[in-house]
Image (cartoon, rainbow, N blue to C red):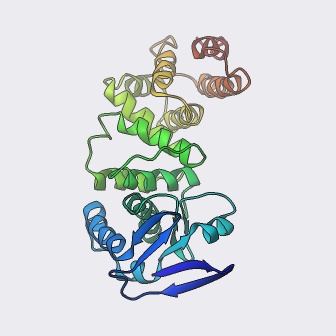
Amino acid sequence: MRLGLVERGNYKTTDYDDLTGYQLEVNGFTYNFGEIIEETRYRVPQLWGFECPPGLLRARLHFSEEKYFNRMVKNEHYGIFSRHTGAHVCLGLVSEAETYNLVIHEVAHEIHYRQGYYEGADEIVQEAVAIMAEEEYAVREFDWNPHYTAQQLLHQLYDLPGFGPLPFHERWSLLSKLRTSQQISHLINHYLDEADGGPFRDWLARRLPTPEAARSVLNVVATATEKYALYNRRLLLARLRQIEGVAPLTSAQCLALTRAVIELKRLDTIKPQESLTNLMELAFAGLR
């Protein structure tokens, strides 16, 4: 473990093998590094079911006082993860007890990285899994991206019975393997439909001619609804089921359907004040 300090304008690092009892005051907050390390050792098995790797604590967990940390990341952050050096946590912004949560957020990135999924995931997925780990202990509100969008998507998943009540290790297994925010959106739509009894799933099976066509529609719906609340997601799924007929759609009709959903996304972008119901009527006017 490494502690970084700015002393007389110069940045210095100090490595500690045993920080038990070592304390540091930054901006009026006092940090006992022995307590921080012990809490981390306690939480990792609680969450992931294995002991905290000793190499993580000794070589991949870093603390820096605010003066240096904000020079390093260019703006105010509470923590940052690097696949090259590991988890970095800022001291001087929150209390020691809250710092436990910052550490577990950055350690979650490390676990995600060690399991082989971090580098293939976009930033929203990376932050969603870290926020999920942190929120096992406390909820921190984010007003910047990608954290804000990640938290909004995560909280929609929490609100759905297929995901929210699951034990942490099952939620981690589902979420940590995803690669894009669109896949999170798809997962939300899936659990939302399941919570409603699966009517959209049944409509897809009845009206889409092939599994490939169904996947194409699901993908475009996931992309269009990425920033929708659950209520608006439900409106769109219900509107698609209103497309008339009982026979499978033709290839041309499938293409028209996906284009209509893409048009809905475009209209929603250029007319953000318009109601979704009106936008859907415009986008789907040519569908029968």
Q: Quadrant of residue 47?
A: bottom left
Nearest to the observer: residue 178 or residue 135: 135
Is 209 located above or below residue 135 in the figure?
above
Quadrant in the picture for the C terminus: top right
Q: Residue at x 51, y 56 (%)?
A: 126
Residue 33 is situated, as x and y percent measured from the top left of the image, at 38, 75
Determine if residue 181 is in view: no
State left or right for residue 20 relative to residue 142: left
User: For the view shown, which residue lies furthest in the front direction?
Assistant: 28
Looking at the picture, does residue 216 appear above or below residue 63? above
Instruction: Report if residue 125 is visible in the image.
Output: yes
Along the line of sight, which residue is nearer the eye, 126 or 282?
126
As drawn, which residue projects farthest toward the right? 270
Task: Say which residue appears at 47% left-offset and 68% top-offset.
Answer: 113
| 170 and 133: which is toward the camera | 133
Residue 153 percent location from the top left of the image: 48, 40
Q: How many marks?
A: 0
Left or right: 145 as drawn, with respect to 106: right
Image quadrant where residue 69 sits: bottom right
In the rendering, at what x and y percent does residue 163 appear? 32, 41
In the visual, does 146 lie left or right of 165? right
What is the quadrant of the N terminus in the image? bottom left
| 197 sits left or right of 249 in the view | left
Give the x, y percent position of residue 235: 49, 18
